[in-house]
Amino acid sequence: MRASVKKSLLEIYDRLFRAYGPQHWWPAKTDTEVVVGAILTQNTAWGNVERAIDNLRRAKALNWRALRSLSEHDLAELIRPSGTFRVKAERLAAFVGYLWEHHQGSLRSMLDGELKTARPRLLSIHGIGPETADAILLYAGDRATFVVDAYTRRVLRRHFLCNEKADYETIRGLFHAALPAVPQVFNEYHALLVAVGKRHCRKSARCEGCPLASMPHDRRL
DNA sequence: GACCAGGCACATC
DNA sequence: GATGTGCATGGT
C-alpha cells in the first residue's frame, strides 16, 4: 500500500472523529439484534430494517430459540418492511440453522476463536457475504475485522484512495494495513464513514459542509 | 414515477 | 473471472 493512502486514511479518521465524535455503533441493543440487522440491511435503508426489527420484537422473536421455531413463511411476514423479505427470511433461517446445528445456539461460541477460522465459518453460510460476516464479527463479536460498505467504497473512490473496481478484500486490506488491529478503532471508523456517507457521500454528492471537502476529491466518482 | 438504500447468489458468457 | 440480474420495501 502506498504510504500516502495510509496517511489519507488516518487523516479521514481524524477529520470525521473531530466533526462527529464517537458514534456508539452498532445501533442495536443486543448481539442478536446486530446479527439480524446485519442480514436485514443488505441493500436496504436502515429505517426499513428498524420496522422489521420492531415487528420481531413485538412478536417476541428477537432471540435464537424463537427464531429457530418460526416457519420461514411467518418469519418473512414479520420482516417484510425490510424488503426482499423472502430472500432475507431464507438467509436468516440459514444462519439460525447453522448456529443451532454447529454451536448449540451460542453466538459466542460461533464468533470466538481464531479470526482465520471464524470468518470463513460465517462466509460458508448461505446469504452471509463478506460485508455481513465482518459486521457480525466486529459489532456482535468484538473482533478486529473492518467492514467495507457502499459508503466506504464511495468515500475511498472519490478521494482517489482506491480505483473503480477494487474488490472487497482489497479495500478491507487497506484499512487493516493502515490501522492498529483494535476492534474499537475499526468500529468507530466504519460508523464515522456511514455518518459522513449519509450526510454527504450518497450517490449524488452533497459536498457542502463535508469534513472531507477540503481534501482532494471528485464528486462525480 | 424514477431513483436509491450499510448485499448476495446465481446464470451466463 | 468478469459482468448482468433478481430480490422488493419505503423514503426522497
Image: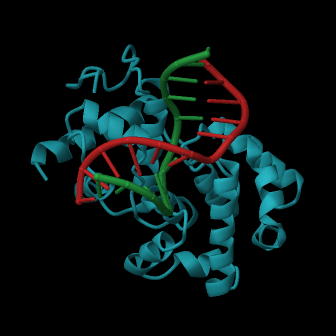
Chain colours: A cyan, B green, C red
Give the percent coordinates (x, y) of residue A156.
28, 38
For residue A151, which quarter of the picture? top left
Q: Nearer the viewer, residue A23 or A88?
A: A88
Residue in view at x 69 percent, y 43 percent? A82
Residue in view at x 63 percent, y 75 percent? A107
For residue A10, which quarter of the picture? top left
Residue in view at x 52 percent, y 63 percent? A128
Q: Point out the image quarter for the C terminus of chain A.
A: top left
Quick check: A194 left or right of A105? left
Q: Is residue A109 shown above or below A86?
A: below
Q: Kindly tell me whether residue A32 is visible in this rendering.
A: yes
**Residue placed furthest toward the top:** A208
Q: Kindly tell me whether residue A62 is visible in this rendering.
A: no
Quick check: A23 left or right of A207? right
Q: Is residue A125 shown above or below A51?
A: below
Q: Nearer the viewer, residue A216 or A13?
A: A216
Give the percent coordinates (x, y) of residue A153.
34, 41
Quick check: C4 left or right of A101? left
Give the percent coordinates (x, y) of residue C6.
56, 45
Give the percent coordinates (x, y) of residue A103.
63, 84
Residue in view at x 67 percent, y 51 percent? A28
For residue A81, which quarter of the picture? top right
Quick check: B10 left or right of A49? left
